Image (cartoon, helix red, strand yellow):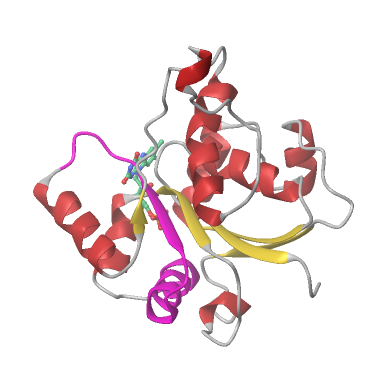
């Protein structure tokens, strides 16, 4: 596992679990180690918004979603309660954590340094260790508390990347639309990809 990049992806209980799923799928199509964390709320929304069923395997679900897993890709999955998982310690080195989607509750916990479950603790560790932490906060409209929590998390070192899809590449289905967001997350993690065509003025 020495040369493999390691990424943490957490799915929380905001709408838009498809963003986390598309990101995990994209990472597992490369020789990466992906550590997935799903909050209790995230599990509920995931079951509601996708065909995922908690009784069945997450990997089988990803394959049903069209994932073509890289032969060296590896996956670990944790609930929010498994607070002894490796990313809860700063001594475990990884290459970035993404919370996609990030609920206002988890955002608030991170902004106030609560570290009260595996996801918020791992995010807190990223901030103290100066490792990439990318949040995809999802709510609308946003109240002042949400906005202030985003500002606070941003000041502490998080990248705030609301899942706002773009339309200039003419996505023709929901997956392509979501990938306009996932592509930007991969860019920030430094993962090469060709999920979405890049804007180039010359070609216009
Ligand atoms: C169908 C559904 C959609 C939800 N969408 C959002 C949302 O978009 N943003 C949000 O902040 N909370 C949303 N919630 C509420 C969160 O799931 C709830 O606040 C939960 O406690 C978040 O906990 P977690 O961050 O630990 O997953 C939604 C709940 C449900 C059932």
Q: Give the left or right position of residue 170, taking residue 148 as reference.
A: right
Relative depth, front residue between 5 and 124: 5
Compared to residue 153, the image places residue 179 above or below, namely above
Name the residue at the right extreme.
71
- Please name the residue shown 46% across and 36% down the image: 16
Q: Give the left or right position of residue 135, taking residue 204 as reference.
A: left
- Please name the residue shown 51% across and 23% down the image: 177
The number of numbered discs placed on residues in the rendered structure image is 0
Is residue 131 inside the magenta stretch? yes
Name the residue at the front extreme.
202
Compared to residue 89, the image places residue 99 above or below, namely above
Is residue 31 inside the magenta stretch? no
- Please name the residue shown 37% across and 32% down the image: 164
Task: Say which quadrant the N terminus sits in.
Answer: bottom right
**Quadrant for ligand 1?**
top left
Relative depth, front residue between 18 and 156: 156
Q: Is residue 24 visible?
A: yes
Q: Where is residue 172 shown, x and y percent of the image?
A: 56, 12
Compared to residue 172, the image places residue 48 above or below, namely below
Q: Is residue 10 visible?
A: no
- Please name the residue shown 57% across and 54% down the image: 190
Q: Where is residue 57 shown, x and y percent of the image?
A: 77, 48
Q: Give the left or right position of residue 25, taking residue 186 as reference.
A: right
Q: Where is residue 178 shown, x and y percent of the image?
A: 51, 29
Compared to residue 102, the image places residue 124 above or below, namely below
Report the span colored magenta.
Answer: 116-142
Name the residue at the bottom extreme.
91
């Amino acid at each position: 596992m020495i040369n493999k990049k390691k990424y943490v992806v957490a799915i929380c209980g905001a709408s838009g679990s498809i963003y986390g799923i598309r990101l995990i799928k994209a990472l597992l199509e490369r020789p990466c180690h992906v550590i997935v964390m799903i909050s209790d709320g995230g599990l509920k929304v995931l079951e509601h918004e996708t065909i995922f069923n908690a009784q069945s395997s997450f990997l089988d679900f990803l394959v049903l979603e069209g994932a073509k897993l890289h032969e060296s890709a590896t996956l670990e999955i944790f609930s929010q309660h498994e607070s002894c998982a490796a990313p809860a310690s700063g001594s475990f080195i990884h290459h970035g954590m993404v919370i996609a989607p990030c609920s206002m509750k988890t955002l608030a916990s991170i902004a106030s340094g609560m570290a009260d479950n595996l996801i918020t603790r791992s995010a807190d560790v990223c901030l103290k260790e100066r490792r990439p932490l990318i949040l995809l906060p999802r709510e609308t409209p946003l109240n002042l508390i949400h906005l202030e929590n985003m500002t606070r998390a941003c000041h502490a070192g998080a990248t705030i990347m609301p899942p706002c899809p773009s339309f200039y590449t003419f996505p023709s289905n929901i997956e392509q639309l979501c990938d306009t967001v996932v592509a930007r997350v991969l860019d920030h993690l430094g993962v090469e990809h060709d999920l979405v065509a890049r804007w180039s003025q010359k070609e216009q």
